[in-house]
Amino acid sequence: MSKELLKGIINILILSTLPIKDSYGYEIAKTIKEKSNNVNHASDSIKKNY
């Protein structure tokens, strides 16, 4: 998967967590991990790219 595509997907995942509650850093990564059935790749990519 290209880096630009991954960044776009990560942005969508982050924005999709905001209406749920106010979240920052670790909480956003945790919510995304839960939404993606505990796939570590998503939260690891967030930590690397942001």
Image (tube, helix red, strand yellow):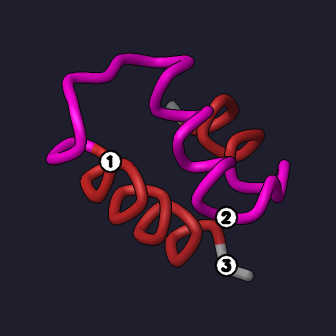
Image coords of residue 11 (percent x, y):
36, 57
Image coords of residue 44 (percent x, y):
77, 40
Q: Residue furthest left?
A: 19
Residue plotted at (31% across, 22% down): 23
Q: Marks 2 and 3: which is nearer the front?
A: 2
The residue segment tinted magenta is 18-42
16 or 50: nearer the viewer: 16
The local secondary structure at tag 1 comes to: helix
Q: Which residue is mark 3?
A: 2
The local secondary structure at tag 3 comes to: loop
Residue 5 to residue 40: above or below: below
Gap between marks 1 and 3, in whole Å? 23 Å
Q: Give the left or right position of residue 7, taking residue 1 as reference.
A: left
Q: Which residue is mark 2?
A: 36
Query: In the image, is residue 34 part of the stretch drawn in magenta?
Result: yes
Residue plotted at (84% across, 49% down): 40
Gap between marks 1 and 2, in whole Å? 12 Å
Residue 17's label in the rendered image is 1
Residue 6 to residue 18: above or below: below
Amino acid type of the residue tagged 2 in the rendering:
Ser
Question: Could you tell which of marks 2 and 3 lies nearer the N-terminus?
Answer: 3
